[in-house]
């Protein structure tokens, strides 16, 4: 399984460097990578630097601004086994999608279908009666068990913030 780790925002300069919005805990992880994939094509990383929360990558096969422009808005992926481990308490979206969502009182709500990244991530819960959206606001998600694909939410907080 491949993980999406970032998105190319635009070319940077005239020598083919690209500016990347990281989907990781920080842009610094790009400095440790040897390669990335774009549309299934492998690109060796020749150089990486960070600044202002973004990464700047020089990729083999991207010699100039015109070549870099063709990569605008493309997502960068890595095989799961090559991806850096997330920080304690953080998870890759791919690792939590499909998790069963239960309340702290044991009530099964449904399955986590999607996560939209925002200032506060918005989770989409699939239930028998349709979809419910809820933010991952403070106190809503109590625990995540990646191994057993189970997420526990506070029933009280969930009812306060869920959008039916």
Image (cartoon, rainbow, N blue to C red):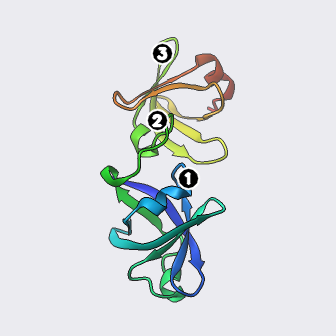
Residue 105: percent from left, percent from top? 51, 11
Mark positioned earlier in the residue sequence (2 or 3)? 3
**Quadrant location, the C terminus:** top right
Which badge, 3 or 1, is on the more N-terminal residue? 1
Label 3 or label 1, whichever lies nearer to me, is 1
Residue 90 in the figure: left or right of residue 156 = left
Q: Which numbered disc flags the more N-terminal residue, 1 or 2?
A: 1
Which is nearer the eye, 91 or 82? 82
Q: What element carries label 3?
A: loop
Where disc 1 sits, the SS reads loop
The image position of residue 129, as x and y in percent, is 49, 29
Reading the image, the residue beneath label 3 is 107
Q: In this view, does 52 lie to the left or right of 24?
A: right
Q: Tell me whether the residue at label 1 lies in contact with that at label 2, contact meaning CB atoms closer than 8 angstroms.
A: no
Indicate the position of residue 17 as horizontal and vertical percent values: 52, 78
The reply to whether dot 2 and dot 3 touch (C-beta < 8 Å) is no
Left or right for 116, reference 148: right
Q: For the residue carrying disc 3, how many other residues have a C-alpha within 10 Å: few (<14), some (14-19), or many (20+)?
A: few
Residue situated in front as seen by the camera: 100 or 58 = 58
- The Cα atoms of the two marked residues, 3 and 1, are separated by 35 Å
42 up-or-down from 22: above or below: below
Tell me what residue is drawn at x 56 percent, y 47 percent.
116
Residue of label 2:
112
Mark 1 — residue? 26
Q: Which residue is drawn at 48% across and 15% down?
A: 107
Report crowding for label 2: few under 14, some 14 to 19, many 20 or more residues within 10 A (C-alpha).
many
How many labels, in total? 3
Q: Which residue is drawn at 63% across and 24% down?
A: 139
Query: Which quadrant would residue 156 be assigned to in this image?
Result: top right
**Of the two numbered discs 1 and 2 in the rendering, the one whose residue sits closer to the viewer:** 1
Q: Where is residue 150 in the image (x, y as percent from the top left)?
A: 41, 27
- Left or right of 3? Residue 17 is right
């Amino acid at each position: 399984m491949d993980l999406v780790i970032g998105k190319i925002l635009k070319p940077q300069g005239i020598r083919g460097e690209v500016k990347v919005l990281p989907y990781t805990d920080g842009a610094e992880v790009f400095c440790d990578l040897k390669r990335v994939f774009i549309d299934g094509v492998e690109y060796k990383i020749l150089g990486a630097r960070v600044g202002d929360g973004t990464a700047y990558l020089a990729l083999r096969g991207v010699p100039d601004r015109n070549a870099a422009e063709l990569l605008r808005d493309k997502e960068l992926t890595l095989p799961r086994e090559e991806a850096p481990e997330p920080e304690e308490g953080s998870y890759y979206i791919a690792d939590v999608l499909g998790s069963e969502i239960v309340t702290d009182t044991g009530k099964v709500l449904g399955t986590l279908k999607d996560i939209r990244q925002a200032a506060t991530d918005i989770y989409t819960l699939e239930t028998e009666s349709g979809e419910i959206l809820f933010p991952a606001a403070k106190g809503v998600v109590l625990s995540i068990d990646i191994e057993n694909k189970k997420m526990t939410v506070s029933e009280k907080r969930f009812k306060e913030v869920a959008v039916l």
